[in-house]
C-alpha cells in the first residue's frame, strides 16, 4: 500500500500522518521489556501527533477546502479515496484532543508498573482505536469505511475487556460486541444498496441522490440502525451503559467522547447524499432524539454507579444532538434556512462540547476510582477535602453538562432553543416549538442527576473508609482534566469561537448556508450572551470580595454540622446518592424502573436489615433478554434434528434427493 | 508433471508406512508436504499443457483449490510434528499414511477433467480420511467414523449415478459418449434436459453430502468433533473445497447446458438452509469442536449461495475457498491445542484460555473474529462481496436471510468463544503436560498471518488467478 | 440374449426381496454375493464379446461375488451375531414397501426419455428398484452389517444402470470405482470389528451418543 | 431619549437593589393582619438582613469551598436575572434575542449551587431539602417555558422585554383564555420557586417537610444575609414577570409607569400574603401533582395560541 500523492506535504497529509502515528504509538510498547517506557513513548507520540493534527485540521476547517487522496489498493471494490472536507476536519478535533488527553491520563491512571499484564494491550488498542476513527473520517470508499469501522469497534472491545477477570466486564463486552456487530450488518446493507444506486463503492457526492429513488428509505433506515446503534440512540443504546461503566476510565472517555460521535458522523454523512429528504426522516430523528434525551437522563438520575450515570447522560446528550440534526433536516425539507442553521449549529456545537466535558467527567471519575477503588456513589462522600482540585474540575464539568450558563453546554442548547422558538414565526412546523419545554425538562433532570453525582461523591462526610483515605490525583491526571475544563470555560465565555468552529461544517452540510448572514446575526447574539456571562462572573466576584471583607470584620468560628437534634449523627445518616434521587425516581416512576429489595421487618426489635435499589436496564432486561431466551428455547427444540440415529440421517439424504427430483420435474 | 503431483505423496505414504519410528514420521510427512507445495507452486507459475486426451488439465479453478489444499496441508504437516509429540501414547503410522494418500487423491481431484476419475479420487479421499477420524480409538470416535464413512459413501454413490445419467444423456443424444468435462461442455447443447436435470440433482445431493450442505451435513459435527485438530482442519479446509470444486465442475456444465437457473436456485435454497441450520445449532453450543463443525456447515452454505447468485458473487465464492480454508485451519489447530491443554472440549471446563494459553487462546479468538467476517481478515472480503452482490442484484430476501443468519451465528459463536478465552481458568480444571510451543503455535499463527494479509492485500498473481477462474464460471452470452 | 438378461434381472429383483425379508445376516450376505455374480454375468449378455469384457466380468464376479462377502462374513463371525433382531421397521412392512417401490420404479422408468432400443430392457427399472431396496435396508435395519449390505445393494443398483453405458465408462474408471467399493467395504469391515469390540454388539442404535442434547 | 434609557436603567437597578425585602415585609404584614396581629413593621426584613451582615459566622467543619460558593452564586444569578426582566412598561437594561432562555437557566445555576452548598454540610435534613428542591424545580421548569412560548407567540418577539412589555389589555381581550391559563400556571410556579405556602413554609425551621429554609440551616451571619436578600430578589424578579401577565396596565408616562409597577408589585405581595394565610401547606405527595397541573395549564395556553 502506498499513497499516490497529489501535491507535496500539506495539511491533509499532515492529518493523515498524525493519525497513523497515533495508531502506531502503542506498537513499541509491545516489544519493549522495561515497564512504562512504551506507555510514556505512546503518550508523547500521541500528544505530538495531536498538536500537528489539530493544527492541520483547523487550517483545513477554516480554509473550507476539500483534499482528496487515492489509496492504492487491489481489493476488488473500486478505487479507495481518502477525502478531508470541513465536516471530516471538524470531527477530527475531538478525535485527536481526547485521545491525546487520554494517553497522558493513562500514565497516572493505569501505570505500567501496576498493570504490567494489561498495559501493553491497552496502550496499543487505545492508539489503534483513535487512529481508526481519524482515518474513518477520511474514508470515502464504503468497504474501506466498514473495515475501519470494524477495526474501531473491535479495538474498543478489546479495550473494554481489559479487566476480563470480572464477570460484569465480560458481560458488558459480549453485549457490546453483539450490538456493534449487528450494527455492522446493517451497514453491510447500507453500503451495498448505496453501491447499487451509484454503481461503485465510493460514497456518493453531496446532494447526488434523491430520496424518492428506490431503496432510499431502506438506505436511510439501515444507516439509522447501523450508525444509531454506535451512537447509542434509543432504543439502540442497550450496550452503552454497561460498556462505558466497565471500561477503564480513559477508554470510557474516548468511547463516550468520540466513538459515539462516529455514529453521528455517519448519520451526517448519509444525510448529505440526499437533496430532498422527506419530512418523515427529520421527524423520526427528532422524535427518537428527544426520547433518548429524556429517557437517558431519567435513567441517569436513578443510577448509583458513577460511571453508569455518566454513560446514561451520554445517551441524553446524543439524544439532544440527534434532535438538533432532526430539526435541521426538517428545516431542509421545509426550506427553512434559519431552522437548518440553528439546528445544525446547535447539534455540531453540542457534539464538540460533549466531547470536551464528557471526557472531563470520565477522567474525573477515573481519578476518583483510582483514589477510592469503587464506582458505587453510596460508598463515597467527602472526597472534596482529599482531592479539591479534582473536585473543582469535576464541578466545572458537571455545570457544563447540565447546560447551565456560563459554560459551553448552555451555548449549544441555547442555539437549539432559539431554533425551536423561531418556529413560532415559521409558516410550517410551528409545533416544533413544543420541544423547548421538553428540553427544559431534560435540563432539570440533568441538574438532579449531576447534583446527585457531585454531592454524593465530593460533599458531606465519607461514607466508607475507602472514601475517607482519598488522596489528590497526580499531575498526569490533573493536566488533561484541566485542559478540558479550560476549553469548556473558553467556549462558555466566548461562544462566538464555538460558532466560528462549526460554521464551515454547517456549510459543507448545507451549501446554501454559505452566503447567508445568519452566522453574523447569531454571532452577535452570542456576543450578548458572553457579555452577560462575563457580567455574571463579575457580580459573583464583587459579591465574593464584599463577603470576604465582611467576614474579616466579624468573628468566624467553626463547629460541627448541626445534627438536627441527634446527638450522634453518623455518616450513614446523610442523604446518600440513592436517597437523593428517590423522590425524583418516585415522581418519574414508569420511565425509571428500579429493582427494590425491601427487608421484611418483623417483631419488636428487628435485627439488621438491608435495602437495595438497583435501576433496571428497561429495554435490555424487558425486551432483548426475553427475546434471546425464546430464541434459545426454540433452537433447543430444533436441535433434536441432530439425534444421532444414523438410519434417519440416511432418510434425510433420500428425502432431499426426492424433493429436489420433484422440484426438477 | 501431473503424475509427479500424484505419485510424490504416494511415495511419501509408502516411506512413512515403512519407517518404524513414530518420532520421525511427522518430519517425513512435512518433508513431502513441502515438496508437494513446491511442485504446486511450480505448476501454478508454469502451467503444464493439457494432457493428451484431455484427462488432466490444471485450469484456474483447479489451481485455486490445489493451492489452498497444499498450503493447508503443509501447515498441518508441520503442526503434526509438535502435536504428535503430545500423542506419543499411540502409533501415528496410519495417521501419516492416510494424510499422504488423501493428499495424493486431493491433487488428483484438482487436476483431472474427467468426471469419473474425479469421482474415484473423491471417494478415495473419503475413505482415506476415515481411519484418521478414528485416531483417538474410543467409542465416540468409532461412532463418528462409522457415520462419516457410511453417509459419505452413500452420498458419493449417489453422485456416481448422477455421472451415469450424464453419460447416458450423451448416449441418448447420440454424441460420442464421454465423461470428459470439455466434451460434455462442447456437446452440452444437444443433451436431453430430462437426464441432465436428474444428473444435476443426484450430483448436487452427492457432492453436497461430501461438502456437508444441510440437511446432508449430519455426519459433520460428529466427525469434526471427534477427529484430532489437524484432521478437522484438513476435513473442513481441504476436503470441503474438493467437493466444492466438483460442484464447480457441474456448474460449468450447467452453464453450457443453459439449464443453469434450476441449479442456481437449488444451490441458493440449500445454501441458505445450511446457514440457517448452522445458526440454530451454533446457539449455546457447549462443545467448541462441534461448534466449528457447524461453522463449516455455515461456510459451505455461504459458498453455495454465492455460486447460486452468480455474477460478482462468484469471485466471492472462489476467494472464500482460500479464506475459509485457511481460517478454519487457524481455528481447528488452535482449538486442538486448547483441547490438549484442558483435556476437554466442553465450555463448562474450558475457561480463561487467554490466561492459560496466551497464544492458542489469542489465535482462537482471532480466528473467531476472522471467520465471522470481520475485517481486516480475508473472510470479510469474500462474505462482503457475496452479500453486497446479493443486494446489488436486488435480491433483498436472500441478502436479508444471509445477514440475519450471519448475525445469529456471530452471537452464538461469541457466546461460546468469549467465555472460553476470557476470564480465569477454573480452579478444578485438570492440568495437563501441554504447553504452547513454537511447533504447535507457529503453524496456526502462520495461517492467521496469511488470512490477515489476504484481508488487506490480494497479490496480483492471485488476483489474476481468481479473475480467470470466475471468468470460467460466468454466463457465456 | 436380451430375454435371458431380463430373466437375470428378475432374479436380481427377487434377491432384493430376499434380503429385505430375511433376518439371518449370513443368508442376506450370500444373497448379495449371488446378486454380485449375476451382475458380473450381465455385461457378457448385452455386449459383443471382447477380452476387455471378459476381464470386467471376472473382476466383478471376483470382487462382488467373493471378496466382499468373505470380508463381511468374517466380520459377522467375529461379532458372533446370527440375525437382525427387531429392525426399526418390521419385515412385512419393509417387504410391502419394497414391492411398492419396485412397482413405482417400473412406472417411473417408463417415462424416462430413453433410447428406443433400451425401452424394452428392464435395466433401468431394475436398477432403480435395487437402489430403493438398498435405501430401504439402510434406513430400516439396526445392525451395522445390515447397513453395509444395504450400501452394497445400493451400489449394485447403480452398477445395473452402468451396464447401459457401454464404452462411456473407461476401464480405468470402472476399475477405480470397484477398487473404491472394495476398500470402502474393507474399511467398513474393520470399523464393524471395532464396533463389536467397543460395544460388544453391532446394534447401531447404541451408536447415538453423538448428538445435540 | 438616551438620557431616558439611562434614567430607566438607574431606576431599574435601584429598585432591584432596594425594593425586594419590602415585599417580604408586606407579605408578613398581610399575614399578621389576617391573623389579627399587629405584625412586624414593613421594614423588618431590612433590619434582619443588616443585623445578619454584622453578625459573626459559623462554618461547619464538614463544609468545603462549595458551601461558601453557594450564597454568592445564588445572589449573582438572581442579580443578573433581575437585569434581564423588564420592570413595568420599561424594557430591561440587558435585552437580546433569546435572553428569556438565559433568564430561565440562571435560576437553574443558582439552584444548583444552593443545593450543593446544602449537601456540603452532610446534614440529612439539608440533603432532604435539596432533594425536594431539585425535583420540584425540575417539574416547574417546563411551565416557565410554556409561558415563554405563549408570550413570545403573542408578542412575536424573542426577548423578555418586548414580550412582557407587549402584553396589554388589548392582548387580554384577544387571547384572554390563554393568558388566564398562563396566569394560573405562573402563579403556581411563582409560589413554588419562592418556596411559599402551599409548597413550603418559610417561617418554620424544624419541620421535616420544608424545602428552601432547611437547605440554608447551616448558613449564618453575612452568608445568611446574602441568602435572604437573594431569596427576596428572586421573589421580586419572578414577581415582576408575573405582574406583567396579571396586571398589564401602562400609561404612556414613564414616571407614572414606575409608580404603577411598584404598586402592582405591592399588590402581588398582598395577594401572596392572603394566599399564605388562607391556605395550608400541601402534603408532600400532592406537591408534584399541583406542579404538573400548572404545567398542563401553561401547555394548554400554548396550544391555544399556536394552533
Image (spheres, grey):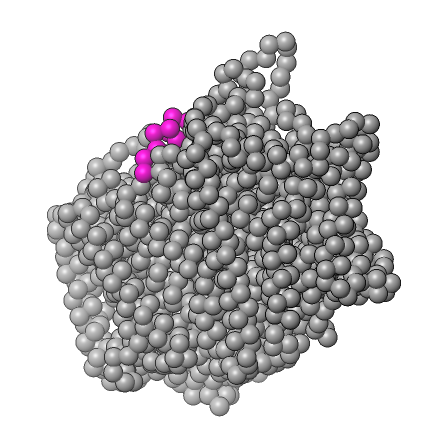
| Residue C85 shown left or right of residue D237 in the figure | left
On the rendered structure, is A568 left or right of A601?
A: left
Q: Residue A200: x, y in percent?
A: 46, 81
Image quarter (top left, top right, bottom left or bottom right) of the N terminus of chain D: bottom right
User: Looking at the image, which residue is at 43% across and 26% down?
Assistant: A557
Vertically, is B99 above or below A509? above
Magenta span contains residue B186: no
- Image check: A1 left or right of C117? left
Determine which quarter of the picture holds residue A461: top left
Residue at the far bottom in the pictured view: B477
Residue D189 placement (x, y as % from top left): 71, 46
- Number of dots carrying numbers: 0
**Residue A466 covered by magenta stretch:** yes
Residue B374 vertical position relative to residue A384 in the rendered view, above or below? below
Relative image position of residue A425 (x, y in whole percent): 71, 72
Instruction: Magenta stretch: give its range.
Output: A464-472
Can I make out residue B209 in this image?
no
The reply, left or right, for residue D150 in relation to residue D213 is right
- The quarter in which the C terminus of chain D is drawn is bottom right
Closest to the observer, C58 or D94: D94
- At 14% from the left edge and 57% from the top edge, which residue is drawn? B28
Above or below residue D116? Residue D121 is: above
Query: Residue at point 67% right, 63% down?
Result: D91
Q: Is residue D14 visible?
A: yes
Q: Quadrant location of residue A26?
A: bottom left
Pick out the residue farthest to the right.
Answer: D173
The residue under the point 53% across, 65% down is A528
Q: Residue furthest top?
A: A604
Amino acid at each position: 500500500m502506498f499513497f499516490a500523492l497529489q501535491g507535496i506535504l500539506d495539511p491533509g497529509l499532515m492529518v493523515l500522518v498524525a493519525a497513523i502515528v497515533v495508531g502506531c504509538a502503542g506498537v513499541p510498547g509491545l516489544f519493549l521489556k522495561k515497564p512504562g517506557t512504551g506507555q510514556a513513548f505512546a503518550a508523547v507520540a500521541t500528544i505530538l501527533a495531536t498538536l500537528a493534527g489539530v493544527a492541520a485540521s483547523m487550517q483545513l476547517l477554516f480554509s473550507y477546502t476539500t483534499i482528496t487522496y487515492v489509496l492504492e489498493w487491489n481489493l476488488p471494490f473500486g478505487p479507495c479515496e481518502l477525502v478531508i472536507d470541513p465536516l471530516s476536519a471538524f470531527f477530527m478535533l475531538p478525535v485527536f484532543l481526547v485521545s491525546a488527553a487520554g494517553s497522558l491520563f493513562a500514565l497516572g491512571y493505569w501505570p505500567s508498573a501496576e498493570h504490567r499484564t494489561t498495559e501493553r494491550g491497552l496502550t496499543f488498542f487505545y492508539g489503534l482505536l483513535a487512529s481508526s476513527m481519524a482515518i474513518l473520517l477520511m474514508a470515502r470508499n464504503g468497504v474501506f469505511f466498514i473495515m475501519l469501522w470494524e477495526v474501531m469497534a473491535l479495538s474498543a472491545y478489546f479495550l473494554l475487556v481489559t479487566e476480563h477477570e470480572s464477570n460484569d466486564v465480560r458481560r458488558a463486552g459480549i453485549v457490546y460486541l453483539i450490538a456493534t456487530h449487528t450494527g455492522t450488518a446493517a451497514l453491510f446493507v447500507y453500503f451495498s444498496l448505496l453501491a447499487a444506486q451509484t454503481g461503485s463503492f465510493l460514497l456518493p457526492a453531496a446532494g447526488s441522490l434523491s430520496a424518492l429513488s428506490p431503496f432510499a428509505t431502506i438506505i436511510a433506515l439501515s444507516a439509522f440502525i447501523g450508525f444509531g446503534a454506535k451512537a447509542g440512540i434509543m432504543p439502540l443504546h442497550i450496550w452503552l451503559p454497561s460498556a462505558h461503566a466497565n471500561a477503564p476510565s480513559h477508554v470510557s472517555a474516548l468511547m463516550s467522547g468520540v466513538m459515539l460521535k462516529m455514529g453521528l458522523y455517519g448519520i451526517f454523512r448519509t444525510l448529505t447524499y440526499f437533496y430532498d429528504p422527506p419530512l418523515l426522516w427529520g421527524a423520526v430523528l427528532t422524535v427518537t432524539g428527544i426520547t433518548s434525551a429524556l429517557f437517558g437522563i431519567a435513567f441517569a438520575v436513578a443510577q448509583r454507579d458513577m460511571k453508569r450515570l455518566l454513560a446514561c447522560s451520554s445517551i441524553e446528550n446524543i439524544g439532544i444532538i440527534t434532535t438538533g440534526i432532526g430539526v435541521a433536516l426538517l428545516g431542509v425539507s421545509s426550506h427553512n434556512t434559519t431552522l437548518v442553521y440553528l439546528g445544525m449549529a446547535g447539534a455540531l456545537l453540542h457534539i464538540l462540547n460533549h466531547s470536551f466535558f464528557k471526557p472531563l467527567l470520565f477522567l474525573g471519575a477515573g481519578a476518583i476510582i483510582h483514589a477510592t477503588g469503587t464506582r458505587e456513589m453510596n460508598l463515597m462522600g467527602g472526597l472534596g477535602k482529599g482531592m479539591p482540585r479534582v473536585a473543582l474540575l469535576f464541578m466545572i464539568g458537571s455545570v457544563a453538562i447540565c447546560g447551565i450558563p456560563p459554560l459551553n453546554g448552555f451555548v449549544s442548547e441555547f442555539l437549539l432553543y432559539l431554533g425551536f422558538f423561531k418556529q413560532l414565526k415559521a409558516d410550517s412546523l410551528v409545533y416544533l416549538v413544543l420541544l423547548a419545554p421538553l428540553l427544559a425538562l431534560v435540563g432539570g433532570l440533568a441538574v438532579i442527576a449531576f447534583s446527585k453525582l457531585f454531592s454524593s461523591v465530593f460533599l458531606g462526610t465519607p461514607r466508607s473508609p475507602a472514601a475517607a483515605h482519598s488522596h489528590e490525583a497526580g499531575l498526569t491526571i490533573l493536566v488533561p482534566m484541566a485542559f478540558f475544563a479550560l476549553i469548556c470555560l473558553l467556549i462558555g465565555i466566548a461562544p462566538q469561537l464555538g460558532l466560528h468552529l462549526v460554521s464551515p461544517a454547517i456549510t459543507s452540510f448545507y451549501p446554501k448556508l454559505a452566503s447567508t448572514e445568519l452566522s453574523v446575526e447569531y454571532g452577535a447574539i452570542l456576543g450578548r450572551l458572553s457579555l452577560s456571562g462575563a457580567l455574571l462572573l463579575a457580580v459573583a466576584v464583587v459579591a465574593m470580595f464584599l463577603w470576604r471583607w465582611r467576614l474579616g470584620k466579624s468573628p468566624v468560628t467553626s463547629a460541627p454540622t448541626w445534627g438536627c437534634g441527634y446527638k450522634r449523627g453518623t455518616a450513614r445518616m446523610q442523604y446518600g446518592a440513592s436517597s437523593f434521587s428517590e423522590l425524583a425516581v418516585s415522581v418519574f416512576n414508569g420511565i425509571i424502573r428500579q429493582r427494590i429489595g425491601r427487608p421484611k421487618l418483623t417483631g419488636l426489635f428487628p435485627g439488621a436489615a438491608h435495602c437495595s435499589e438497583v435501576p433496571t436496564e428497561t429495554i435490555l432486561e424487558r425486551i432483548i433478554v426475553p427475546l434471546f431466551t425464546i430464541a434459545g428455547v426454540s433452537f433447543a427444540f430444533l436441535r433434536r434434528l441432530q439425534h444421532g440415529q444414523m438410519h434417519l440421517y440416511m432418510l434425510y439424504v433420500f428425502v432431499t434427493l426426492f424433493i429436489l427430483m420433484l422440484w426438477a420435474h | 508433471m501431473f503424475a509427479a503431483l500424484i505419485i510424490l505423496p504416494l511415495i511419501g505414504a509408502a516411506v512413512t508406512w515403512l519407517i518404524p519410528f513414530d518420532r520421525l514420521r511427522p518430519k517425513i510427512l512435512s518433508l513431502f508436504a513441502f515438496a508437494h507445495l513446491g511442485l504446486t507452486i511450480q505448476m501454478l507459475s508454469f502451467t503444464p499443457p493439457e494432457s493428451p486426451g484431455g484427462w488432466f488439465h490444471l485450469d484456474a479453478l483447479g489451481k485455486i483449490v490445489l493451492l489452498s489444499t497444499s498450503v493447508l496441508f503443509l501447515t498441518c504437516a508441520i503442526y503434526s510434528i509438535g502435536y504428535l509429540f503430545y500423542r506419543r501414547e499411540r502409533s501415528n503410522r496410519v495417521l501419516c499414511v492416510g494424510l499422504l494418500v488423501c493428499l495424493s487423491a486431493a491433487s488428483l481431484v484438482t487436476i483431472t477433467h474427467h468426471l469419473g476419475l474425479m469421482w474415484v479420487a473423491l471417494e478415495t479421499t473419503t475413505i482415506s480420511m476415515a481411519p484418521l477420524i478414528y485416531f483417538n480409538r474410543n467409542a465416540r470416535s468409532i461412532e463418528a467414523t462409522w457415520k462419516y464413512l457410511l453417509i459419505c459413501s452413500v452420498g458419493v454413490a449417489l453422485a456416481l449415478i448422477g455421472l451415469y445419467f450424464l453419460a447416458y444423456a450423451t448416449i441418448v443424444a447420440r454424441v460420442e459418449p464421454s465423461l470428459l468435462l470439455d466434451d460434455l461442455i462442447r456437446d452440452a447443447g444437444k443433451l436431453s434436459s430430462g437426464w441432465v436435470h436428474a444428473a444435476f440433482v443426484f450430483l448436487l445431493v452427492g457432492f453436497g453430502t461430501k461438502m456437508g450442505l444441510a440437511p446432508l451435513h449430519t455426519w459433520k459435527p460428529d466427525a469434526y468433533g471427534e477427529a484430532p485438530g489437524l484432521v478437522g482442519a484438513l476435513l473442513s479446509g481441504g476436503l470441503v473445497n474438493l467437493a466444492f470444486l466438483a460442484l464447480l465442475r457441474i456448474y460449468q456444465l450447467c452453464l453450457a447446458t443453459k439449464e443453469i437457473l434450476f441449479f442456481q436456485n437449488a444451490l441458493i435454497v440449500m445454501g441458505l438452509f445450511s446457514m440457517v441450520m448452522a445458526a440454530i445449532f451454533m446457539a449455546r453450543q457447549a462443545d467448541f469442536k462441534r461448534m466449528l463443525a457447524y461453522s463449516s456447515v455455515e461456510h459451505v452454505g455461504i459458498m453455495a449461495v454465492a455460486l447460486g447468485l452468480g455474477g460478482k458473487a462468484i469471485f466471492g465464492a472462489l476467494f472464500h475457498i482460500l479464506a475459509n480454508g485457511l481460517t478454519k485451519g487457524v481455528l481447528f489447530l488452535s482449538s486442538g491445542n486448547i483441547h490438549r491443554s484442558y483435556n476437554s472440549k466442553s465450555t463448562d471446563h474450558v475457561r480463561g484460555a487467554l490466561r492459560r494459553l496466551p497464544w492458542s487462546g489469542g489465535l482462537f479468538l482471532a480466528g473467531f473474529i476472522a471467520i465471522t467476517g470481520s475485517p481486516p481478515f480475508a473472510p470479510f472480503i469474500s462474505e462482503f462481496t457475496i452479500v453486497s452482490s446479493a443486494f446489488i442484484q436486488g435480491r433483498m430476501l436472500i441478502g436479508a436471510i444471509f445477514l440475519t443468519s450471519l448475525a445469529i451465528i456471530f452471537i452464538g459463536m461469541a457466546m461460546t468463544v468469549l467465555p472460553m478465552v476470557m476470564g480465569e481458568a477454573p480452579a478444578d480444571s485438570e492440568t495437563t503436560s501441554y504447553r504452547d510451543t513454537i511447533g504447535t503455535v507457529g503453524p496456526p499463527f502462520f495461517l492467521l498471518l496469511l488470512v490477515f494479509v489476504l484481508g488487506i492485500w490480494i497479490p496480483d498473481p492471485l488476483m489474476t488467478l481468481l479473475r480467470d477462474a470466475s471468468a470460467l464460471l460466468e454466463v457465456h452470452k | 440374449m436380451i430375454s435371458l438378461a431380463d430373466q437375470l434381472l428378475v432374479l436380481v429383483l427377487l434377491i432384493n426381496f430376499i434380503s429385505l425379508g430375511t433376518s439371518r445376516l449370513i443368508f442376506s450376505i450370500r444373497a448379495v454375493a449371488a446378486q454380485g455374480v449375476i451382475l458380473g454375468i450381465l455385461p457378457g449378455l448385452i455386449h459383443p464379446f471382447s477380452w476387455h469384457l471378459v476381464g470386467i466380468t471376472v473382476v466383478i464376479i471376483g470382487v462382488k461375488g467373493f471378496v466382499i462377502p468373505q470380508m463381511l462374513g468374517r466380520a459377522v463371525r467375529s461379532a458372533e451375531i446370527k440375525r437382525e433382531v427387531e429392525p426399526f421397521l418390521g419385515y412385512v412392512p419393509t417387504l410391502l414397501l419394497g414391492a411398492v417401490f419396485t412397482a413405482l420404479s417400473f412406472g417411473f422408468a417408463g417415462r424416462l426419455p430413453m433410447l428406443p432400443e433400451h425401452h424394452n430392457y428392464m435395466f433401468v427399472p431394475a436398477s432403480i428398484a435395487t437402489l430403493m431396496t438398498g435405501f430401504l435396508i439402510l434406513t430400516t435395519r439396526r445392525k451395522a452389517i445390515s447397513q453395509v449390505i444395504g450400501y452394497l445393494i445400493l451400489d449394485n443398483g447403480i452398477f445395473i444402470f452402468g451396464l447401459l453405458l457401454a464404452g462411456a465408462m473407461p476401464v480405468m474408471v470402472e476399475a477405480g470405482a470397484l477398487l473404491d467399493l472394495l476398500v470402502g467395504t474393507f474399511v467398513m469391515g474393520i470399523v464393524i470389528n471395532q464396533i463389536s469390540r467397543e460395544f460388544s454388539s453391532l446394534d447401531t442404535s447404541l451408536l447415538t451418543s453423538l448428538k445435540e442434547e | 431619549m438616551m438620557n431616558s434609557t439611562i434614567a430607566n436603567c438607574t431606576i431599574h437597578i435601584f429598585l432591584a437593589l432596594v425594593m425586594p425585602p419590602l415585599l417580604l415585609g408586606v407579605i408578613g404584614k398581610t399575614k399578621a393582619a389576617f391573623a389579627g396581629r399587629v405584625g412586624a413593621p414593613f421594614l423588618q426584613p431590612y433590619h434582619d438582613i443588616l443585623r445578619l451582615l454584622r453578625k459573626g459566622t459559623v462554618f461547619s467543619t464538614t463544609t468545603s469551598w462549595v458551601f461558601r460558593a453557594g450564597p454568592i452564586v445564588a445572589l449573582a444569578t438572581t442579580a443578573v436575572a433581575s437585569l434581564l426582566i423588564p420592570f413595568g412598561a420599561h424594557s430591561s437594561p440587558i435585552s437580546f434575542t433569546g435572553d428569556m432562555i438565559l433568564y430561565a437557566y440562571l435560576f437553574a445555576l443558582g439552584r444548583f449551587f444552593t443545593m450543593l452548598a446544602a449537601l456540603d454540610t452532610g446534614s440529612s435534613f439539608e440533603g432532604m431539602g435539596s432533594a425536594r428542591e431539585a425535583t420540584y424545580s425540575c417539574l416547574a421548569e417546563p411551565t416557565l417555558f410554556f409561558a415563554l412560548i405563549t408570550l413570545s407567540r403573542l408578542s412575536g418577539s424573542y426577548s423578555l422585554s418586548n414580550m412582557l412589555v407587549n402584553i396589554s389589555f388589548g392582548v387580554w381581550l384577544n387571547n384572554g383564555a390563554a393568558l388566564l391559563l398562563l396566569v394560573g400556571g405562573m402563579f403556581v410556579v411563582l409560589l413554588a420557586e419562592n418556596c411559599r405556602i402551599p409548597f413550603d413554609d418559610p417561617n418554620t425551621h424544624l419541620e421535616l417537610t420544608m424545602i428552601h429554609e432547611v437547605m440554608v440551616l447551616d448558613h449564618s451571619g453575612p452568608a445568611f444575609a446574602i441568602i435572604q436578600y437573594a431569596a427576596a430578589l428572586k421573589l421580586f424578579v419572578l414577581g415582576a414577570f408575573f405582574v406583567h401577565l396579571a396586571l398589564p396596565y401602562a400609561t404612556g408616562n414613564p414616571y407614572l409607569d414606575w409608580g404603577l409597577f411598584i404598586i402592582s408589585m405591592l399588590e402581588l405581595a398582598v395577594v401572596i400574603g392572603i394566599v399564605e394565610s388562607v391556605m395550608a401547606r400541601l402534603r408532600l405527595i400532592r406537591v408534584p401533582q399541583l406542579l404538573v397541573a400548572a404545567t398542563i395549564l401553561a401547555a394548554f395556553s400554548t396550544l391555544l395560541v399556536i394552533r
